[in-house]
Amino acid sequence: MVDGLRAGNLTKLNPVTDIAANLKVVEDRITAAARRVDREPAEIRLLPVSKTKPPAAVLEAHAAGYRRFGENKVQEAQVKWKALSGHADLEWAVIGHLQTNKAKHVARFATEFQALDSLRLAAELDKRLHAEGRRLEVLVQVNSSNEDQKFGLPPEEVVGFAEQLRAFDALEVRGLMTLALFTDDQARIAKCFERMLQVQRELRDATGEPWNELSMGMSGDFELAIEHGSTCVRVGTAIFGSRGSGDSPETWWPGLFQ
Ligand SMILES: *Cc1c(COP(=O)(O)O)cnc(C)c1O
């Protein structure tokens, strides 16, 4: 078991050389996918997802021109925010489910939150943001695959939810986020993305607002997502390497989760 972990470590990326090269490969794949459907590559934002990776990995990507990073756990994101506070232009996007009692932390340091899925959470974030004198870019998470995920709003509830969000003026609501079905079946993944475009159309009709941001696509499906209108791809593994079992924040920050 321990030997297995060590063997895994040998195949880890060398962060000093590989992250910039991986970013270039992903950028080229984004460009090619956009061109296939006559979209402008500049319409698509690449959000590197640095979860489980050390601050040094974030700095590698920062040196390659990236400022905003995706994290799915608040505590880990906060540790990196503090560790890298000398880099004033760094921004953090929280992309994972958030418990209401952690909203106060997100209100303090995040620039963007992509997993809004309850009014209670919206109200708490709004209250905490006002207290901090801050605002937050927000995406509403939609459960586009229905039964297979527990987070995100059912598509048919999004319009009603969106109308109630107007009450929270510290939230800059930009659009929608989803995780597609986790499968190799491209047709079923595409169905999730198509469902998102449909929800976006309903929102535009109902609210008269643009709802332009569609955050969809990860390492395994970002090209398909771009072909279906994604404006933000959240890519971790293809940039920073796999997240092995020996690759937890505990290894670069002992005591973090005590
Ligand atoms: C981890 C994560 C990603 C990135 O996943 P990869 O497959 O490593 O690219 C994207 N979105 C969310 C919400 C995540 O938690």
Image (spheres, rainbow, N blue to C red):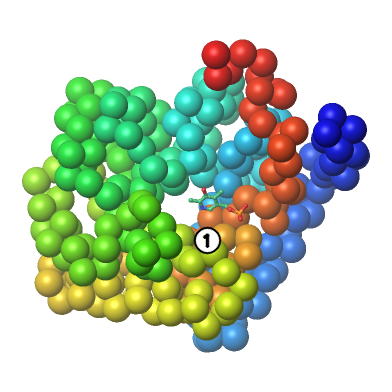
Q: Residue at x 89, y 33 (%)?
A: 3
Q: Residue furthest front?
A: 1
Q: Position of residue 117 (x, y in %)?
A: 27, 50
Q: Position of residue 190 (x, y in %)?
A: 48, 79
Please state which amino acid type lies under the numbered disc 1. Val
In-image side of 34 versus 215 (left or right):
right
Q: Residue at x 69, y 43 (%)?
A: 243
Quarter of the image that includes the C terminus: top right
182 over 134 or under it: above or below: below
Within 8 Å of ligand 1, the CB of disc 1? no
Q: Is residue 251 shown to the viewer in this render?
A: yes
Q: Position of residue 40 (x, y in %)?
A: 52, 76
171 over 178 or under it: above or below: above
In terms of secondary structure, where does tag 1 sit? strand
Callout count: 1
In the image, 234 versus 27, the foreground residue is 234
- Which quarter of the figure has residue 51? top right
Quarter of the image that includes the N terminus: top right
Q: Is residue 59 shown to the viewer in this render?
A: no
Q: Residue at x 33, y 60 (%)?
A: 142
Using a 10 Å C-alpha cutoff, classify the residue at mark 1 as few (fewer than 14 neighbours), some (14 to 19) or many (20 or more).
many
Q: Residue at x 66, y 36 (%)?
A: 53
Residue at numbered disc 1: 233
In-image side of 1 versus 117 (left or right):
right
251 over 116 or under it: above or below: above
Q: Position of residue 118 (x, y in %)?
A: 22, 46
In-image side of 168 versus 59 (left or right):
left
